Image (tube, rainbow, N blue to C red):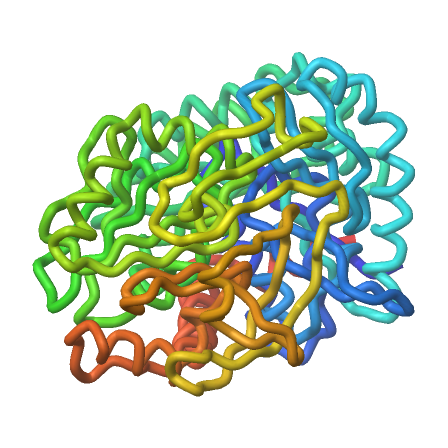
Amino acid sequence: MARAIMLQGTGSDVGKTVLVAGLCRAAKNRGMRVRPFKPQNMSNNAAVADIPGEPGGGEIGRAQWLQAIACGVAPSIHMNPVLLKPQSDIGSQVVVQGKVFGEARARDYQMLKPKLMNAVLDSWAKVGEGVDLVIVEGAGSPAEINLRPRDIANMGFATRAGVPVILVGDIDRGGVIASIAGTHLILSDEDRKMISGYLINKFRGDVSLFDDGLLAIEKYTGWRCFGIVPWLAAAALLPSEDSVVLERLASGQSRALKVAVPMLSRIANFDDLDPLKAESEVEVVFVAPGRPLPDDAGLVVIPGSKSTIADLIDFRRNGWDRDLAAHRRRGGHVVGICGGFQMLGRVVRDPDGIEGNVTETEGLGLLDIETVMEPEKTVRNVTARSVAFDTPLSGYEIHLGRTTGPDCLRPAAVISGVEDGATSADGKVFGTYMHGLFGADEFRQKFLESLGVKGAGIDYRAEVERALDELAAHLETHLDCDAIFAAAR
């Protein structure tokens, strides 16, 4: 088995995903064969990894997809063996080794965890074959001791697999001394022995001002510090750990095009918008529930959703349907992706109750289509071609449902010879099942030019690679990476 080290956080969104990606790239740059691993992830931001010997593919967390890129390897379903995709406040779809295992309410899932540990350990063994180092990402916090007896994401995995842990604290949110010392206090002796030390992330200002803080943490814990990571702007180019960050996204300076994105309660794959955010003349505004869609937006993008009907009902509850209708009267453009595409039609039907108790709801009526939810799930990586701009596209599909109607005669794309999506008669509204279309540089450039944006068309993938290299160099400078890699066993 490969040597391994695990990063666990004092809480969610402390930056574990980005740190693991940066350490993966640093290890790769040192010539190591390195792989990422996350036993359990909870996210509706999913990616598609191929399943050897099978058509289509399987789902993993988008974060592990990014970390695989950092390692310079193709993503594998074994890099994230358990993926939870929240469908409501109390229940999630459970994906195991890339395939839908079932659905579980939160309390039922706690009882299911011990059975899932076998899949976690099976994938763990596969990820470690023939490599030098595996860098593991925890989920949430090991301080959630009420969940410890059945834990498979943090110390439950670390103790079972014998992987040493580095604790990550986020100083930007405050209380970092208490969070690290408090974690030390409430961990069991067995779990405490697994921790090799800690690091502090997202520091702003003069690091020397925290010298007394380091002494305090040492006094209370006895743990060594592997370093303090200053805030890095380049990390903004990388996909976020989870949707928590959307609540903190504010609009930037005024630019040539404002893109409004309603924050659906079950928003999925919102990193579809990252390539647009990276364009210097595009301002992407995530609109929080209760706030109107901005009337100066030239484009509204309705993103993917884990529960189309529930989010469609919430869309109306927020008054966004009225805002969208006004946007169209002003001549504005609209794009719907996956669940957002389904919402743009006349009706969404779910006769088998796949998404919940509501079996039919009226759509937004901007496309003459209708969608029927069906049990079979489409999960695959795809290459395609834009019909409107005759440019290549590449991305992936993760969806339930079949969409038909007159506007499908004007498809948005052709995927492997099959028409996909639909377009309105005036060409200002289109929808597609394909995630990732904005990542296609030539398409994005021509699409934005059609909306009046000049000079668009950065090499987005090159920007991500550059950000990963900058992140790795940043960590090499501010962390004791020699000691971190030496702590692996």
Q: Residue at x 64, y 72 (%)?
A: 382
The residue at the point 44 percent across, 86 percent down is 391
What percent of the width, then of the height, locates residue 416? 66, 78
Quadrant assignment, res 331: bottom left
Which of 378 and 280 lies nearest the eye of the viewer?
378
Q: Is residue 196 visible?
A: no
Residue 380 placement: quadrant:
bottom right
In the displayed structure image, the side of residue 340 where residue 71 appears, left or right = right
**Position of residue 132 measured from the top left corner of the image (x, y, whole percent):** 78, 68
| Picture residue at 79% right of the left edge, 32% below the top | 102
Residue 281 visible in image: yes
Left or right for 431, reference 196: left
Q: Position of residue 128 (x, y in %)?
A: 83, 60
Query: Which residue is more in the foreground, 200 or 56?
Result: 56
Above or below residue 345? Residue 360 is: above
Is 69 located above or below residue 199 in the figure?
Answer: below
Residue under the point 61% across and 19% down = 357
Left or right of 87 on screen, residue 286: left
Q: Identify the image quadrant of the N terminus.
A: bottom right
Residue 53: quadrant of the picture? bottom right
Residue 18 screen position, x and y as percent: 49, 55
How many numbered badges does the structure rendering display? Answer: 0
Query: Does residue 358 lie above or below 98 as drawn?
Result: above
Front residue of 489 and 437: 437
